[in-house]
Image: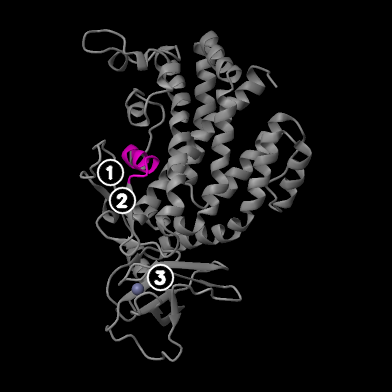
Amino acid sequence: MNICTRLKCDTCSTLIDCRIGMSNRDIQPFQFACPSCGEVIMFTLGTQESNLSGAIEIKNFKGLFDGQNPFVDLHLDFPASFETYKMGGTTYMKAVEELGAEAIGNLSYRLSMLNLLYSKQRDLQRLITQYKRGNIKSFKKICNDFEIPEITLKSEKKEDVLAALYSVTSIMSSPITIHAQNEELSKKIPLILQDLYEKYNKNTTNFVNKIIENQFLENLHHDCLDLYPNIVSLDLPIRPTLYYDYINSSEHSKVPARVSTSDFGTCSNFYKDLAEVFSRQLVLLAGLNNLHNRGDHDLFDDKVRLNKKGKIIKEFSSLNSYANVDLGKKLGAIDNPFYQIDKQAIDNNLRNSIAHYKYDYDEASQQIAYYPKKEGMQRNIEHSLYFIQFMRKTLLLFREVHNLNHVIKSLLYFKIFILRKE
Ligand SMILES: [Zn+2]
């Protein structure tokens, strides 16, 4: 179903023709910029009041759009276009045409899962807080509050608490992650750990003991957990990016498409947080990879470790030094990895620009310009991408963090069952 309405911008009085495609989400908050003056216009469907702000609705508008006014096409679930109005060419119909019935069916299923789960964000937050505090009684109570049969606490043993915790984070993120990827890594990592323990018993034990004793593993686990309620709270701007799971990734960079809700300012810091946690997860991955390839968690490949004169580069002299290396440099130091990272997700320039507040966001075009280079007082070298591409990167980076969370999980089980530590 579509609603066609005409709005008048509060700021510049421009008339805006607006077509809204309905999602199945109960509450639908929309946000877009006036195509003429760029001021933000917002309204919400599915609540008692529409909360229209930034514009007024032309009450007596009954007719069809005639192409005289700027046009915006909105839909929470799909990328919306910036193109001119075409009758019948709705966002949904365009998506059906491009993806085909099967893919649309699959995507709709994931979106309806998201509709069910997003309201449980608060429970997820509470559960993680109680887990981190070690309050098992409250943890158990919140598990029951979810009212999802898979989420139960069998006993108060550490392994059962972990199992319940990982069921919750997996289920809550299931509509936005890729099941096959999760399954692959959650099966592969325990086998790799077992293999390492057999081949390099002492070094593997030392490595795991070390990251337990210096609390690196626990701190990383806690920081990683904190990202789950955040991604669920960003369900609105994430929704249209799921569309790109079904088309060739090179295609979507060419077509400017719009997110019908939220803006870059609301979401930018989350990418930075994801990159921070991911960067520390890489330390785990590098340690295990060094063990896997050379039997010593500190020993990086000679091509990484040594400079042209054959001297050891300090940054790659141990895993501890590697932990301080910039994200951009970290990736290249993991040789012949047992897990392939999706490079599309990582944009260190973007991360740095957000961290240093060196970006401009144009609400009307939803274009982000960012300036990662150190240029003194100037801002000349510009990189740019659309907000929807940014949200896609956020989604992909979350998936990487979620995948590597399986490594953390396996190490925690290793601690309980192999090292017999509480
Ligand atoms: Zn305006």
Label 2, label 3: how far apart the Cα atoms are: 22 Å
- The answer to whether 83 appears left or right of 128 in the picture is left
Left-right relation of 142 to 113: right
Instruction: Pick whichever of labels 3 and 1 is earlier in the sequence.
Output: 3
Residue 204 lies, in percent from the top left, at 53, 14
Q: Secondary structure at mark 1?
A: loop
Q: Give the quadrant of the C terminus.
A: top right
Q: Nearer the viewer, residue 113 or 348?
A: 348
Residue labelled with disc 3? 74
Give the colour scheme shown: one colour
Label 2 with label 3: CB-CB less than 8 Å = no
CA distance for labels 1 and 2: 24 Å
Tag 1: amino acid: Tyr
- Residue ID at (41%, 14%): 318
Question: In the rendering, at what x and y percent does residue 179 appear?
Answer: 50, 45
Q: Residue at x 77, y 46 (%)?
A: 141
The residue located at (49%, 12%) in the rendering is: 199
Between 171 and 391, the residue placed more toward the observer is: 391
Callout 3 secondary element = strand
Q: Magenta span covers which residues?
A: 347-358
Contact? badges 1 and 2 (CB < 8 Å):
no
Total numbered labels: 3
Mark found first going from the N terminus, 1 or 2? 2
Label 2: how many residues lie within 10 Å, few (<14), some (14-19) or many (20+)? Answer: few
Which residue is painted at 47% across and 30% down in the image? 281
Magenta-drawn stretch contains 82: no
Name the quadrant where ligand 1 sits.
bottom left
Residue marked by disc 2: 249
